[in-house]
Structure formats: structure tokens, C-alpha cells
């Protein structure tokens, strides 16, 4: 029997009971948090009658040292072959040099949705008064918008050419000598993201899905996202989804809301319980994901995944946290909970629940790494000690 995942005729995963998952351990704190997370995920699978093993693949700085490339083709091929993978944080140089490895992985594998569940675990310190009201899943478009990598430096022939084209053909002004970038957003890209979010919100019986946008200012890009999202809901989900303005007081259908992004940032703080799922373009999603993560304790606690059709890479949502690299101080909870999210995606629900419950158990008893201990005003445990505490609490 193969230990590779297959797809059924509806595009769903057919997962073998003995599974091998590729893992890119990552840079910075990546090795620290992986050492803590790996035994927990393996044990949770085993206790629910499954077998999970990991195949380490090179990516990031370690890959440059070993094979001379930060993102070897073989790593991407392995991610594709195995369909479901896991990754730690990968460093991204600011300015010139390499473009973001994370963006490259998302684009190469066409992982068009970045999905971040944000739910507070009791006991975790939070900067807000009622963190128990926060239970949202963010669906962020991953391949378009100003993150498409279409930008050119000030004074370059490309930037000057674009400025000239805009001046001569479009009769519009850009200050000479500007750096310029493009913000492409398509009907195809917007609709497939909103479809994934609608399917999830319907399956999980959420009360609403909110389209978050800046269409009041960027009328054709972000405004397009809103219009295409609404059109999809009205045409393909009629009877199951209703626009907020047409919803009845006792509505049982999924309510499609829309909010301008700046207002949405405020609402996540003032009225978080009115939102169950959010879908949005790339840049807004990047900001809002971290803002929401802060409400449940910070980046060290927030899980995430990048999903495409039949492909998924689950990841710690934070970066390489270089100041803690190799010091056994980082919080491994984001990676552990991303692993739990992966187990749920595989259909291994009992294993996923046991991992979440074990992390919650550790938090409830005040077992915190530095990042949370500082907020809670308690002594900190090491990264490895937190991992052991979770393992001990695994049912
Ligand atoms: P970061 O997430 O590494 O750090 C932000 C803050 O959170 C820092 O104070 C850091 O110490 C803290 N932090 C992050 N993870 C933590 C953890 N597990 N435990 C305790 N504290 C934690 O973001 P940054 O400093 O903006 O970026 C550093 C590098 O990581 C950059 O090269 C950036 O491009 C890259 N990055 C990668 C990813 C990814 O791989 N998905 C995401 C974001 C940033």
C-alpha cells in the first residue's frame, strides 16, 4: 500500500493510514520549534491508530549550504507528490536579492489561499478584555495583488518605461523617478478564493462570511474582488447564501457581509463575535492575520496553512524570530497547532483534537514560553520544556 495521498473523483483527499509528510524545518527558530513539535504530532497520530512520519526536505539557508539553492526543484516536487506538507519559517532578505521564499512556494504550487484560524485557547494571555469572543478564520488570497512581485526600482528602464506609458497613453501622472509596482486582481483569482471560503463556511456552519476590501478607494481591483465575490455567491450559492441587506432576523442561510478593511480592523476589536469567517485580498490579509493573532496571544500561537486544489502546505505563521534562533526559547505552539490543523485537514480529527486539547491544557496551567510568559507576568519555560508539557498532556 502506498503512503502517498490520492484524490477521489470530487477532488477530496484519500489518505493512507501510514502517511509520510514532507517537512521543511526552516531557518532561525525553525529547528528549535520542530524538535518540540515532531514528537507531539507523531504521538497524536499513533494514539488514534495512524502512523505519521516526516521526510525532511531542504529549503532556506540550510538548503543554500547543502545544495546551493534556497528552494530546490526537488523540494517543490516532493511537496507536490505528497500533496500535504509542513514548513517552519523561512527568512526573506529585505530589498534586493531573493524574493520571498514563502511567496515563491505559494506561487510555484499555486497555493492560492492562506488560511488562518484564530481562536483563543483558555489560559493564553491576551491584550483584549474578551478574547473568548474571537473565533474567526481568515482566507487571504495568496497569488495576486501588490504581492505578485511586479515592481521595479526607481530610475530603472522598466519603471521609466511604465511612467512614460502611463503619461502618454493613459494621460495620467506619476512623479518622475518613482519606483512603480502593479496590483493585478482577477475575477478568476478572486472567485476561487471566495469559493473556498464559502465552501468552508457552509461546511462548518458559520453564521457569516465577510468580504474585506478597500473597494471604496481602489474601485476596480479591490472593488472587483467585492463584486466578483458577491456575484459568485448569488449565482452559484443561491438558496444557501444571502446578502446581509436581504437577511431575515432569524436567518438560517450563510450571511455574506462586506466591510471596508479599515473598519474591519476596528470591528475585530470591538465586535469580534459578529464575524466567523473573513475572505480578503493579499495585502489586507497579511496585516489582518497578525492583528488577529495578537488577540489570542501573538504570532507564536497562531496556526496557518496555504491551500490550493489538492495541495496544502501547513506552516508556522511567524517568521524566523532571529533573536531567539538556537536558544531553545521560541514558542513552538504555532507550529504544533499548524500540525493539528494539518491532522484535521487529513481527516484525522481525533488526533487533531487531542493536540489542541493538550496545548490548551498546558496554557490553562500557566505553562508559557517567553513570549506569553512576558504578557502573563509568569516565569517562562523553554521551547523544549513546553513541547514536553504538551506531550505529557496528550490524551
Ligand atoms: P517574526 O515573526 O520572525 O518576528 C516578529 C516578532 O515576533 C519578533 O519579536 C519575534 O521575536 C516574535 N516571534 C516570532 N515568532 C516567535 C515564536 N515562535 N516565539 C516567540 N516569539 C516569536 O517576523 P520578522 O522579525 O518581521 O521577520 C523575520 C524574518 O522572518 C524575515 O526574514 C521575514 O521575511 C521572515 N518571515 C517569514 C515568514 C514565514 O516563513 N512564513 C513569515 C513572516 C516573516
Image (cartoon, rainbow, N blue to C red):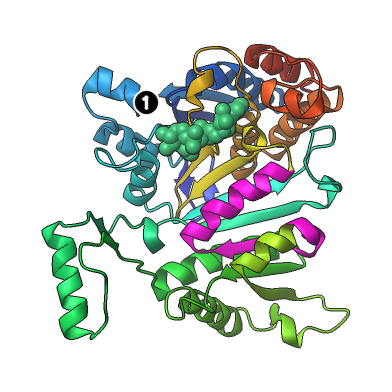
The percent coordinates of residue 231 (x first, y second) are 54, 83
Task: Name the chief secondary structure element in magenta.
Answer: helix
As displayed, is residue 238 above or below residue 49? below
- The verdict on residue 287 being magenta is yes
- The verdict on residue 214 being magenta is no
At x 54%, y 19%, the residue is 324
User: Magenta span covers which residues?
Assistant: 269-295
Quadrant location of the C terminus?
top right
Q: Is residue 86 visible?
A: no
Q: Which residue is mark 1?
A: 57
The percent coordinates of residue 103 (x first, y second) are 38, 46
At x 54%, y 40%, the residue is 15
As displayed, is residue 252 above or below residue 76? below
At x 56%, y 25%, the residue is 52
Q: Is residue 159 visible?
A: yes
The percent coordinates of residue 376 (x first, y second) are 80, 27
At x 54%, y 17%, the residue is 32
Amino acid at each position: 500500500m502506498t503512503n502517498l495521498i490520492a484524490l477521489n473523483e470530487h477532488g477530496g483527499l484519500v489518505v493512507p493510514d501510514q502517511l509520510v509528510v514532507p517537512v521543511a524545518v526552516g531557518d532561525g527558530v525553525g529547528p528549535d520549534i520542530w524538535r518540540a513539535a515532531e514528537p507531539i504530532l507523531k504521538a497524536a497520530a499513533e494514539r488514534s491508530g495512524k502512523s505519521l512520519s516526516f521526510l525532511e526536505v531542504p529549503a532556506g539557508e540550510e538548503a543554500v549550504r547543502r545544495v546551493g539553492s534556497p528552494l530546490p526543484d526537488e523540494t517543490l516536487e516532493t511537496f507536490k507528490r505528497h500533496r500535504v506538507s509542513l514548513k517552519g519559517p523561512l527568512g526573506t532578505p529585505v530589498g534586493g536579492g531573493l524574493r520571498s521564499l514563502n511567496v515563491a512556494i505559494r506561487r510555484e504550487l499555486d497555493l492560492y489561499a492562506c488560511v488562518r484560524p484564530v481562536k483563543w485557547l483558555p489560559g493564553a494571555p491576551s491584550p483584549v478584555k474578551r478574547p473568548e469572543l474571537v473565533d474567526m478564520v481568515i482566507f487571504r488570497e495568496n497569488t495576486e495583488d501588490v504581492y505578485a512581485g511586479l515592481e521595479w526600482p526607481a530610475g530603472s528602464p522598466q519603471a521609466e518605461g511604465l511612467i512614460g506609458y502611463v503619461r502618454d497613453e493613459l494621460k495620467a501622472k506619476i512623479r518622475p523617478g518613482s519606483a512603480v509596482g502593479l496590483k493585478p486582481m482577477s475575477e478568476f483569482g478572486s472567485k476561487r478564493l471566495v469559493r473556498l471560503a464559502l465552501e468552508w463556511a457552509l461546511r462548518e456552519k458559520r453564521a457569516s462570511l465577510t468580504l474585506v476590501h478597500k473597494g471604496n478607494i481602489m474601485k476596480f481591483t479591490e472593488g472587483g474582488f467585492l463584486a466578483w465575490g458577491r456575484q459568485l455567491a448569488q449565482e452559484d450559492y443561491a438558496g444557501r447564501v444571502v446578502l446581509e441587506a436581504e437577511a431575515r432576523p432569524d436567518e438560517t442561510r450563510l450571511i455574506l457581509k462586506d466591510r471596508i478593511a479599515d473598519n474591519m480592523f476596528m470591528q475585530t476589536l470591538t465586535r469580534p463575535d459578529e464575524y466567523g469567517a473573513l475572505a480578503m485580498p493579499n495585502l489586507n490579509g497579511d496585516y489582518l492575520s497578525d492583528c488577529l493573532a495578537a488577540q489570542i496571544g501573538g504570532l507564536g500561537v497562531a496556526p496557518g496553512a496555504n491551500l490550493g486544489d489538492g495541495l496544502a502546505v501547513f506552516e508556522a505563521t511567524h517568521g524566523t524570530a532571529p533573536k531567539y534562533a538556537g536558544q531553545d526559547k521560541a514558542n513552538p505552539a504555532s507550529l504544533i497547532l499548524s500540525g493539528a490543523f494539518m491532522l484535521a485537514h487529513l481527516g484525522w480529527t481525533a488526533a487533531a483534537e487531542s493536540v489542541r486539547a493538550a496545548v490548551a491544557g498546558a496554557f490553562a496551567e500557566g505553562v508559557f514560553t517567553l513570549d506569553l510568559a512576558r504578557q502573563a507576568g509568569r516565569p517562562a519555560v523553554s521551547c523544549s520544556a513546553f513541547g514536553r508539557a504538551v506531550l505529557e498532556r496528550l490524551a
